Amino acid sequence: MEAPDDLVRAVEATLFAAEEPITADALATHLGVADVRQALRELEAHYSERGVRLVERGGRWQFQTAPDLAHLLRREREQVRKLSRAATEVLAIVAYHEPVSRAEIEAIRGVQTSSGTLDVLMEAGWVRVAGRREVPGRPVIYATTPEFLSHFGLASRKDLPGIDELKAAGLLDPVDEAYEDLLGRTAEDLDRESASLVNPEESA
């Protein structure tokens, strides 16, 4: 059986060599051990003040640049194109209400959503198809990805800012009051709206 220090080194080497973030269970399976969580915590503490940090995003572990040094690497990074207002709104709705269908997104926004908007978000790696809603028509439903959490520095969706935080940051204009309703609707409300949009004669 490997000594603890050897396991920490093995976990560190595996994470550095990994092409994408990896879960603790996948690490344990790869290394042939029962558990690597203590090793991960030791590495997380070790790198907490260094130029790179070990972070957990959406249940997957990865090394990333320390936030205060990110500006040094911006010249070398591929710049993600700026999202349109529509894409930003759709991304926010998916993040706060996932899994959500296109009809539900349109019901919240009050306008039609082009397939191109969702395509942009999926090409960016932030939104994925998560299955189909079990309502008439079985519409496709969308959810965010681990890449979305990683890009925005979120450990999980629980770290998304609340409505009061968005207001305090000045990110909600008076014309965006629909977002308050967005965060207050229940899944049942959205299911009913989706069903009525798919089969309008049923709601008549």
Image (spheres, rainbow, N blue to C red):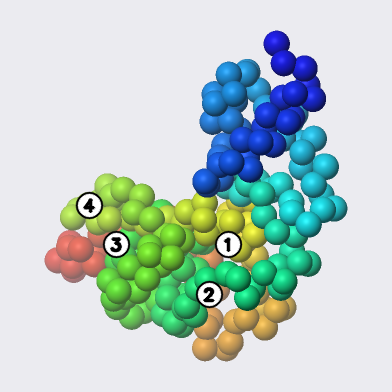
Q: Which mark is residue 151?
A: 1
* Disc with the residue nearer the chain's start (2 vs 4): 2
- For label 4, the crowd category at 10 Å Cα-Cα, with few meaning under 14, some 14 to 19 and many 20 or more, is some
Along the line of sight, the residue nearer the viewer: 180 or 154: 154
Mark 4 vs mark 3, CA separation in Å: 10 Å
* Disc with the residue nearer the chain's start (3 vs 2): 2
**Label 3's element?**
helix
Q: Position of residue 38 (x, y in %)?
A: 75, 29
Q: Are marks 2 and 4 in contact (CB under 8 Å)?
A: no
What residue is at 67 percent from the left and 32 percent from the top? 11
What residue is at 82 percent from the left and 53 percent from the top? 50
Looking at the rendered structure, the kind of residue marked 1 is His
Please indicate whether residue 190 sits to the left or right of residue 68 in the image. Answer: left
Q: Nearer the viewer, mark 2 or mark 4?
A: 2
What residue is at 62 percent from the left and 40 percent from the top? 15
Mark 3 vs mark 1, CA separation in Å: 30 Å
Quadrant the N terminus occupies: top right
Please indicate whether residue 80 sits to the left or right of residue 200 in the image. Answer: right
Q: Do the residues labelled 1 and 2 touch (CB within 8 Å)?
A: no
* Disc with the residue nearer the chain's start (1 vs 2): 2
Q: Name the residue under label 2.
A: 79
Q: Position of residue 63 (x, y in %)?
A: 66, 49
Looking at the rendered structure, the kind of residue marked 4 is Arg
**Label 2's element?**
loop
Along the line of sight, the residue nearer the viewer: 89 or 175: 89
Q: Nearer the viewer, mark 3 or mark 1?
A: 1
Q: Is residue 2 above or below residue 144?
A: above
Instruction: State which quadrant residue 160 falls in.
Output: bottom right
Q: Mark 4 points at which residue?
A: 138
Q: Mark 3 points at which residue?
A: 194
